Structure formats: structure tokens, C-alpha cells
Image (spheres, rainbow, N blue to C red):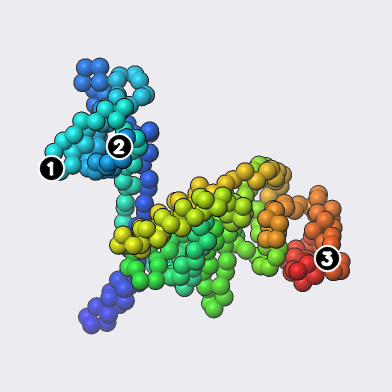
Amino acid sequence: MSMLVLCSIAVQAQQVIVRNVTPIDYNSIAYPNLLGNTQSSQGYKGTVTLNDGTEVKGKITFFRKKDETSLLRVKVNTGEDKKEIAAAQIKSLALDPQVFEKKYPNDFKNPQKNFQPGYIILPTGEKLTGKVAQFRDFSDYDFFVYNIGFLPDGSDVASIFKGGKLAEFGQQIDGKMNIWDGYVDGYLLRLVDGRFRLSRNPYSKVENEFFTSVKNHIADSLAKDAAQRALARSLKRGEDLNTSIENAANAGQVVSEVLGGIEINKKEYLVFDTRTGKVVALNKDNFRDQALSLNSGCSRAVVVSWDAMEDFVKQLNEVCK
């Protein structure tokens, strides 16, 4: 009996509480209620900011005319009273996100799916340490994952970060730190590090898709500063660490994405030049020409071999400092 109790405690101790925060856009909410010629929504917790800058917090019910999309008015139940506010009086609206928490078993055979020592880098540039788990399913490649969980140092609750929310994360497996870069709607394993970073491309015939870190590379400085200030304000207000990190990750998404175009025709390799901020797609058809271009201006030529791609990029990093 005592052995069973000990085993039960050990398994329970491995579990991690994981929080999933889903933003709610008031423009996409439903209006299921109809009274006369007026439709109304269910109540949503949030904040109404008036034109004079004052805020009204509480449960918000939205009203609009039948078969119309424009907002008519809102009713806010603050807990103490109910306030009717016309649309013309409203400067902005913000709904509280939906928050779901569940226990994560953290005892998978695949070590990547368990919380391991690691770090995340926000689009704003902050590096935070803790533990990282990859929330993998059957559709993920070995070199590509859609969602991860991050348990910050000093917190008992992990947060989910979907693809593109983070510039980078690292996860230590068997003493080796594996680095993953934010890319489109997921994260790509960095096969080779250095000035030139090598990754596999999980998509085919994709246009204008870039690494989150590339977006950050030429991010608008004001937007980046605003996101960093948002993190600092959140922490100073005494909000928990997870909420602060999530806010900063979301704020970081305002970085500029006007980078020009790159068309990827085949699901092959991607090389990111950290010096120029450019991404090059390599496939069997263009490899020799692109390889010569990447090697131009370097101290010496490197051996070009499609079948030894990692060795090729490692050589580039040696001669193209």
C-alpha cells in the first residue's frame, strides 16, 4: 500500500498546471438575443474607455439594430450599478481573454513533450528562463512544432505560446540545448547556428512568410519600445509573471512585417543570414546558384554538396564571419 501511495505522489508531482489564454474580439461575438428590432449579446467581462479617458470595467452587453453590424450601445454591469453607454461616447473597447487551465501529465515517453530546462525570447528581445514543453501531435514534423508551453522560473503555472508569438525558444534535452525559431504559425528547429542559420522548410508554395526573428530584426523601434514598456508596467502593477509575459508577447506582434517578398517553391531548406536579415530558400533546382551567392565575398570557397547541407552551412559560418 505504501509503495502505491509513493507512486501516486510521484506522478502527481510531475503534473503541471497549463493555462491557455484566448483573446476575444468584440467584433466577432454573437448576438443571439432579439427584442423588437434590437439584438443583444451575452455579457463579457471587459473595459470600456470613454472619449474623456475614463474607464468603466465590468460585464459588458452589446446592442445593435437587427441585421446591422454597427454598434448601437453597451450596458456595463460594474457589480455596483448598470451603466448605459452610447456608441458615440466610446473611445475603445477591450474584452478580457478567456482563460482555461488544465493539468498536464508531463510524463510522456517523448522527452520533448515534457517540461525541460530552457528559455524563451519574446519578439521584444527579452530572454526569460524556465522550463519548456512541446505540445506535439501527429501532424507535427520532427523539425516543426505548432505550440509550446513555458513554465517561468518562480511560477507554478505554465502558459501556452502558439507559433509566431515568440522569436525563439530553447529546450535542453540530454544536456543539449536545442534552439527553435518562430516561423509563420509554428517553430522551426535550428539545425545549424551561427551567422547563417539552417532550418528545414515545412511549407511549399508559400509567399511572404518569414521568421518571427526576421520581423523583429527590422521592427519599428517605437513599437518594440512600447512592448517592452508594457512588460515593465505589467510587472510593476503586481500582475503575475505569466500574465506579464503573455501581454508582452502579444504586444510584440505589432512589429513591422513589410520585408519584401520571398517565394518558396519547394519544401526544402531555409537559410537565415543574421547579418543581412534575409532568408534564402534552397532546393535542388537552385542550390548551386544560391550556394555560390551565399559564399560570395567570403575568405575562401566552400565545398558545395546538396547531400551534406549541414556541413555546407557550417563551412559558410567558418569562412563568412
Residue at the far top: name it.
37
- Residue 177 pos. (x, y %): 56, 72
Residue at the far front: name it.
52
Instruction: Measure the C-alpha gap from mark 2 to mark 3.
Output: 60 Å
Neighbor class of circle 3 (other Cα within 10 Å; few <14, some 14-19, many 20+) is some
Name the image quarter holding residue 205: top right
- Residue 292 pos. (x, y %): 84, 58
Name which residue type carries label 1.
Answer: Glu
Give the residue at x 33% y 38%: 93
**Residue annotated with mark 1:** 80
Q: Which mark is residue 52?
A: 2
Of the 4 image quadrants, the one containing the C terminus is bottom right
Q: Which mark is residue 298?
A: 3
Name which residue type carries label 3.
Answer: Cys
Up/down of 10 relative to 221, above or below:
below
Neighbor class of circle 2 (other Cα within 10 Å; few <14, some 14-19, many 20+) is few
Name which residue type carries label 2.
Answer: Asp
Q: Secondary structure at mark 1?
A: loop
